[in-house]
Amino acid sequence: MNLNRRTLLLSTAAMAATAATTRAGFGQSKDSGTIRILMNGGDADLVTTNNAIARFNMKYPDVKVTVDMDPISTGWGDYVTKVLGQFTAGQPYDIYGTAIETFQTFASRGIFQPIDDFVAKNPNYSDFAPALFDDCKYQGKTYFVPTSWNNIMINYNRDLFDKAHLPYPKAGWTWDDFRAAAKALTAKDSAGSVTQWGYEVPNQNFFLQPWFFSNGTGILNDGWTAPNMLDPKVAASLQFLHDIIHVDGSSPIPGNDTLDNQFLAGQVAMISRGHWIVPNVKNAKLNMDIAIPPSKANDYTVVGFGAVGVAKGVQNLPAVEAMLAELSGPELEIDVAKLGGSVPGSKTAAEIPEFLAFPPSANLYYQTLAHTKAVPSPANFQEVEKIFIRYYTAMMSDEMSIADGCKLADAELNDSFARLKASLTKR
């Protein structure tokens, strides 16, 4: 579902409520026991989680809370496989941090607890964009509470633009403008070896989506029920990225590793990332700013949401819900805004000076939301992502033609959706 600017300009009265009001309905308890949490992200996310646990333990001092972090270094498909394995083995965590890529997969399998009553009695969620909660539903029930989001922007090194005497990207720049900039920002030594790449052609599904959306297409249909790989615009988007690599020499062939470290070291001028890169950029003292992804048919980019949910059948549900409230409350949202791991779900938190201070164009994160589409996230996402990336990598490395890759991916994705339909019919 698309977000728009109007839905984000919500009443912020709830955000101004006191901490006591924040947790109305989640009173003090002498309950004991253990709550296990599996979260995702990096150092900033661990800090916000630990702060939430500390607040929770002020009210539930006899409940031990443990947290493990998954960096999602290989994508959400592998995270899905990991979590489903935990449930199969009968060893699930109590609370999971996750993202929209997993919502339908988890909810369709009946392994998470519906939390509509919990959401209804928490007044702070009125400060969240309604569309965030809409995307947390499956078959009319809410299974997750959104906490943060990221949209893919072009992150660029301003010093390298200055060195190349290039103007900074402006709203409305085109694919052709981008390609020309990537070429101009690529540098070679006297032996012809690249010393600075103009752009990193992405190696992950989420990072790639703006190149399809801005061309008026997608790898799946709008309902996420079937592949769309045979749309000529999909092939055109892939050809564009292929040519940046093989015709212009402005990017390396996508590999298993991302080029975040090379970007931070000034060896890559532009990458496609979300707000999560900001803490590392600050630590590296990189002169970075962001730009709206370039347009072809439009200037749409992709958005993904982080959220927390409760495993079905947890013990001591009141305490677990109180922990869930802390993991999605106003204090956590302020922490998210200050630490910069992502964009907070709360509009009020995203307007604090600390969030808007860096990058210089930080206001663009929210400005782009009127032109975003959610990352395609069907219930068979883990298969869809692996199939698509496998063929995408083969096409980018010239192991197969783009025409053949699209055709073969389409056929394999169709088989995956057929299996999904059959499995859901049996339930």
Image (spheres, rainbow, N blue to C red):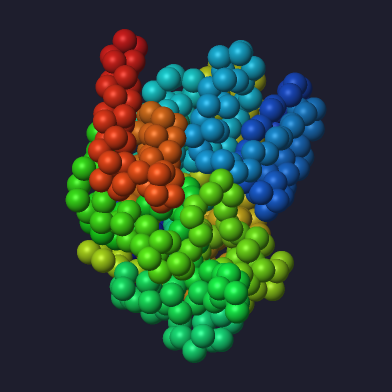
Q: Quadrant of residue 342?
A: bottom right
Snapshot quadrant of residue 382: top left
Measured along the vertical axis of the image, is residue 7 above or below residue 97? below
Q: Residue furthest front?
A: 191
Residue drawn at the location 26% of the way across and 51% of the way down: 235
Q: Residue furthest bottom?
A: 165
Image vertical order of residue 27 relative to residue 333, above or below: above
- Residue 79 seen in the current view: yes
Closer to us: 420 or 330: 420
The C terminus lies in which quarter of the figure?
top left
Give percent across and percent down for residue 329: 58, 47
Taking the image as shown, residue 427 lies to the left or right of residue 195, namely left
Which corner quadrant of the image does residue 390 belong to?
Answer: top left
Q: What residue do we see at 53% from left, 49% from top?
A: 255
Between 2 and 141, the residue placed more toward the observer is 2
Measured from the top left, where is residue 11 in percent x and y? 42, 59
